Amino acid sequence: MESMINNTNTVKKDAQKKTQDKTIRFLVISLIITLIVCVITFSAQGYFMNKKSEATIKELGSLYMENMDKQLSMHFETIMELRLSQVLSLNQVVLSAEMDEKTVRKELRKRAEARGFSHVAFYSRSGNFDMLSSGHIQLIDPEPFLTSLNAGDNKVAIGLDESGHKVVLFGASVDYQMRNGEKCTALVMALPVESISDMLSLGEDNSMVYSHIIRKDGSFIVRGQGTERLNYLEQMEEDYGKNNRDTIDRYKKELLEAMENRADYSGVFQIDGQRRQIYCTPLNYSEWYLVTVMPYGTLDKTVSQLSMHQLFMTIGGCVVILGMLLVIFTKYFRLTRKQIEELERARSQAEAATRAKSEFLSNMSHDIRTPMNAIVGMTAIATANFDNPEQVKHCLRKITLSSKHLLGLINDVLDMSKIESGKMTLNKDLVSLREVLESLVSIVQPQVKAKKLNFDVLIDGITVENVCTDSVRLNQVLLNLLSNAIKFTPEGGTINVSFYEEPSPKGDEYVRTHVKVKDTGIGMSKDFQKNIFESYVREDNVRVNKTEGAGLGMAITKYIVDAMDGSIEINSELGKGSEFHVIIDFEKATVPEEEMILPEWNMLVVDDDEQLCRTTVEALAGIGLKADWTLDGESAIEMVHKRHARHDDYQIILLDWKLPGMDGIETAKAIREEMGDDIPILLISAYDWNEIEDQAREAGVTGFIAKPLFRSTLYYGLKEHIEGAQVVQSTKERKDDFHGKRILVAEDNELNWEIASELLSELDLQLEWAENGQLCVDLFEKSQPGYYDMILMDIRMPVMTGYEAAKAIRAMNRSDSNIPIVAMTADAFAEDIRKALESGMNAHTAKPIDMNEITRLLKRYIG
């Protein structure tokens, strides 16, 4: 079987390891694919952006070139029109004046030179010049010029002067008689070609673009920068034709076709790794062409730099993003591994919790069945022995004990359920630490007596007795610790409870209170101490197999202490016992305290615990009394004898019951024999006074003060004896007297009413039954004021709940609307108590009915 379990665990671990490896492999592959996709995406983006930049630059260049050529063409046209208009205006001026031929020639030459023209001539229809100025001119391409002028058009052409320098000829149609008798077709004036270049600003050194004016055969009219030859096409051949013949031939062919058709031309060609953009447009009034060239060297360099910057930015962005992805992946990878580990840990914890709960249920099955078996069995025995009162009484006593134990188990399970669902809350009310401890001592006394345990409670320097906290939960913590100590301490063992305080780090409004519960029980192993505060855990050991309990008490205790912002520690050793140390910072209660001062009497304190003697003497000094102390009865008798011999008797003696050697009763008897009845002798003990009262009275004990010995306990316990009051009546002779008191019980369950009626009738109470909250309100409203002395109110009732009924009664305009209302319900959690008090009720007691608690509440409110 064990081998099968080990094999199953191995298979589970292998499966988990494969799952983890698969997850990690998926993450790594995802990262690699993401990196590759990022690199490809950014590379494609860079390439696309580079191509897009080149296309954009080309488009911008074309627009720029086209616009620039248009501007130059318009500028050229404007200049030509201006010069031609000057020629025509000179002709009109001369014609308007009546001059002879000689004067006309002289006047035309004079006015032309005044306007900057270098040559003036008449041009015949046959193509001959009749010079009016010195020198002569010669047309380079006369045919188009003559044809246009004979057709009556104004025309511009290129020619050579007598020195062979190029001049621009401006021809305008006129009608003059030439010297050789021919008829003039045009008046021609010439300007040096450089003047045209200057006017067009073509000679400026501009690294971005340069322009030429050429003829159709490629010869320059105006030559811009970057050329040395006389022909543009020859210049291109010389510069780029050797290694780029195909490109040059294609470019020349396209350019010549465009010039032949007098059309615009735009082209980009690349030669020797350099791009150039050409734009050619025909010029009006001439057979010339404006050619603008933009080398892409600077732009290519700029674009290249931009592309490099873009590439660097892309690479940088890629690196940053990849770095971020890597960081995110690493973080995610670690988180994933951590989550896997946490899931594995949570799975292990869940399995451990499941095992613990299974073990808990197994234990609980035994623990619940044990008292249930006792209840069923004893009920059967009592039924079978109905005629034997003693046997029935014995069975009922066993049934009562088993029922209380079963109720404790159920309460623990319900409390744990509340804690795990997060519904457990704390209330804050005024709490007397003295009353809490006195109540605890009275509760555990029967168990202490049954196991014959040595039990003591020590109070050391407690000055703040009233605090604000949740009294129910504080009682639960202390009772859990005491119950465990009693449960795991064998007969004859010792249990000590000690209380002491110190200043709180939270400030003067708080007091830090320490509670230690120490026993000489079986102790705990180191391993179990680590898990003692976990739910559903108890030590699986033959030493505790017969010990009943749910294993939830310590988990509940730890939760409550944590909720109070306190701490709990444990120190235990197997076979030597355990000590629990609880530290809680309580808020001091702002309630006026009675001034506790007694006459300056001499006292003697006798107890076998030295620390208790010292703290008691300090407490007595705080209320005005002077005290000596001793640790045994023999010494006490000797001290009393010595004081009596010098006529300085003790005025009160406090004797512990459990003293070594001579016990407290024997000591009291010996003192009475010597001193008589004048000195009050008070017994102090954490045990039940009723058990020894008769014996103590016979020995001469005057009264009893129950431990723990708070300052207020000592004050009120001593006050009646110091003031000369009568000795308190024997508790066996006292009887709670509730005769004539009428109680209204609101209870919807008939069986519960029957139980309450039987139990409460023993207290001589008159009871009336209301079957729901509405009926309770109606009965109270119809009654005379003061008719009812108290209302016991169930909570979960039809028609109207207990909360609603209490609010309705408090809202009535009656003199007794403040009647004591006590919740008597199975809703027993702290929030249930809080809701009961908020609805106007005075107190709360849980079902099943605890007669001691009911009696206490009756005495408090109507006793």
Image: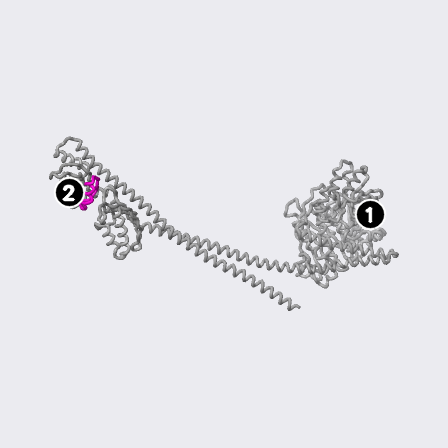
Residue placed under numbered mark 1 in the picture: 757
Q: Residue 461: in sight, yes or no?
A: yes
Where residue 861 appears, as percent x and y from the top left, is 78, 43
Q: What residue type is labelled 2?
A: Ser
In reply to whether residue 45 is colored magenta, the answer given is no
Secondary element under disc 2, as helix, strand or loop, is loop
Which is nearer the eye, 41 or 862?
41
Where residue 852 appears, as percent x and y from the top left, is 79, 49
Secondary element under disc 1, as helix, strand or loop, is helix
Q: In the image, which residues are magenta?
A: 138-159
Q: Within the image, what quadrant is residue 488 found in?
A: bottom right
Which is nearer the eye, 38 or 857?
38
Which is nearer the eye, 855 or 152?
152
Q: Mark 1: few, some, or many residues within 10 Å (few <14, many ≥20)?
A: some
Q: What residue type is labelled 1?
A: Ser
- The correct choice, above or below, for 374 with respect to 863 in the image is below
Quadrant holding the C terminus? top right
Residue placed under numbered mark 2 in the picture: 126
Q: Within the image, what quadrant is residue 146 found in?
A: top left
Q: Which mark is residue 88?
A: none
**Most extreme residue toward the top, as rendered?**
98
Nearest to N terminus: mark 1 or mark 2 = 2
Q: Mark 2: few, some, or many residues within 10 Å (few <14, many ≥20)?
A: few
